[in-house]
Image: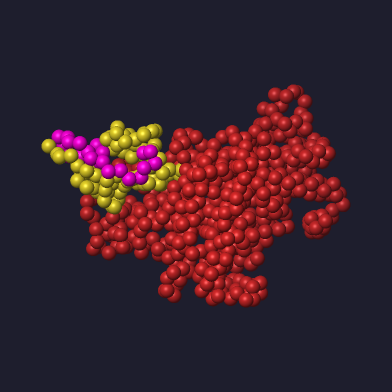
Amino acid sequence: MAAPIAIHLEFGGGAELLFGSVKEHHVTLPNQSEPWDMKQLLVWIRGNMLKERPELFVQGDTVRPGILVLINDADWELMGELEYELQDKDNVVFISTLHGG
Amino acid sequence: MCQVDEEYNGQLEHRVTPRVSKKCVKCKENTAVLIIRAGDAFCRGCFKEYFIHKFRAMLGKNRVIFPGEKVLLAVSGGPASSSMLSQVQEGLSRDAPKKLRFVPGIIYIDEGGASGQSMEERERAVAQLESVFRATNYHYHIVHLEQVLSLPSSVLEAGSSATEKPQTGSSYKAAVDQFIQTRKNQHPDLSVENAQSHPSSLSMQEVENGGTSPITPEQTQALQRLFASVRTLTAKEDLLHTLRQHLILHTARTQGYTKVMMGDSCSRLAIKLLSNISLGRGASLATDTGFSDPRYGDVVIVRPMRDYSSKEIAYYNRMFDIPSVFIPGLDTKAQDKASIQHLTESFVTKLQTDFPSTVSTIYRTSEKLNTACPPQNTHTQPSAKCLLCVCALDTKLEEFSAYQATLISEQLSQRRGPGPGFTPGTAAAPGLPPASSASQCCYSGGGQHQSCMTGEGGCCSSAKEPETVDLKSLLCYSCRLTIKDMTAEDALPQYILSEAERRKRRSQMREEISEFLLDEEEDEAILRVNGSL
């Protein structure tokens, strides 16, 4: 049984437009039986935070190609991408490198 | 690609295996923070060094910028151009002997009028950018896209290059000497050292006249009308790009800049390469995507960011707090299939996630491209350049080209519509009207053409009514397609229309006196007389 964890989310490069133009979000992920990983976080963001056009942020079970992900200021490719297990007070950043956001 | 299962499967799976706390490949001490190319993990310090080195290496390798030269940095506020600005600052501030030695200025084109932003949003964006620019202490020019409506038609003329550019290898030194010499002759009071040591004093003087000039709601409406008359997003993006280039070029010329730096990253250039092929700009790929773009003659465009991927840029900006301003554009929140450019972007980025060398492969291809015929007759034949993109015209080919085949099939399909008779005067029909191709082959001198015989009438009839200028014959293939997507050509800014009229008149004049011309040289002499009259 994992306790609820608080994480800091940040959106940039135009990705913030899909979240009401707010760049920084402090969110608390609720209790669940297994630990939170990035895959579940994306599902949670899609269900709870995305204001519009989810396909511009999530495609399949991962982020849209062209959106970079940083976990605690490091490339998520180094952290195990979707399998990374989120810890309390983690900082996750999404930066769109696409033209027009 | 079809061999994925056989050969690449192992690599693909290997790529996604978690590699937590991997060490940097360079210093092998610190923990890596990002992967640049497949497998190359860098730590923060090594990445910074690598990034800075790459910018200076790019400029050093190409050797096109002279000491003391005025260089205009085209900054859109986006990550790549903001990063370019920070690299220029870095290069100029260093005390090392290899310090960059040119005089930078900044230009920002406010395109909010075309992408439908409100005045408040535009002002906010400009204010944000101004605070970034002010911090650099370079002088900067904020130009609104509306100002394109009052450009002089001389923008569309290719200038002659001041130096005959012997810019490679050992002759670079000679070129630099020549450059400094001409500079001293022009501004005897301003030596290179002077310009170097007081960039800030220069900037303070010129900011006032280079700053924002107010625009009227009427101008904004005229601009919006222009963009509303374009039917597709593909053509809108292309037109916006063309107008932006004209404004940058005009500012560079009037303010005395001889180089313009664009922040195209290699990811962007790979997308541009593929989308330009799809747009029919294959003939000008080399100038559109190469390191230096000499099409304007007196102002050369350089792309020093072309070795960086958009990922590297985004990480660098994030790690070292490089300010950038997000400004929504024409294609913000657009569907994947909204335009050719947008579709190509999503194609390339999707491919890139599974095949990390996609962008670099496309980009290496673009490096190898060269123009088939170098633009040696830049100043002798002004009519041989496209009216809009100022590239060499690709539409004057011989009889059996793919382009002629396209024209013929268009003519045939049009003939069925209006009536059985083939009349060269039906210029109102959409697409490439027969008159345009006919008159065009007239003045290109290919007299044995069948359509040329019927085309005589086309030339003369358009001479009677100079009000309706047939733009298409003055454009390259791709710009024709863009104009074809416009409902009203007369919505185009006046400088384009009047330059088109001037070129048309000149070619008619040439046509009329063609009997009296002896050879090419004499021909040019008469043209020059005409031009001066």
From this view, report whether residue B254 is shown above or below residue B436: below
Chain corresponding to red in the figure = B
Tell me, yes or no, whether the highlighted magenta stretch contains residue A32.
yes
What segment is highlighted magenta in the picture?
Answer: A19-41
Q: Is residue B312 visible?
A: no
Where residue A42 appears, as percent x and y from the top left, is 29, 38
| Quarter assignment of residue B157 | bottom right
Q: Nearer the viewer, residue A78 or B409?
A: A78
Left or right for B81, reference B179: left
Residue shown at the point (41%, 51%) measured from the top left: B310
Q: Which chain is in yellow here?
A: A
Q: Looking at the picture, tell me which residue is in the foreground, B416 or B191.
A: B191
Seen at 67% across and 35% down, the residue is B488
**Which quadrant of the rendered structure holds the N terminus of chain B?**
top left
For the C terminus of chain B, the image quarter is: bottom right
Q: Quadrant of residue A1?
A: top left
Within the magenta stretch, is there residue B292? no
**Left or right, residue B254 beside residue B15:** right
Q: Nearer the viewer, residue B34 or B218?
A: B218
Q: Is residue B464 left or right of residue B299?
A: right
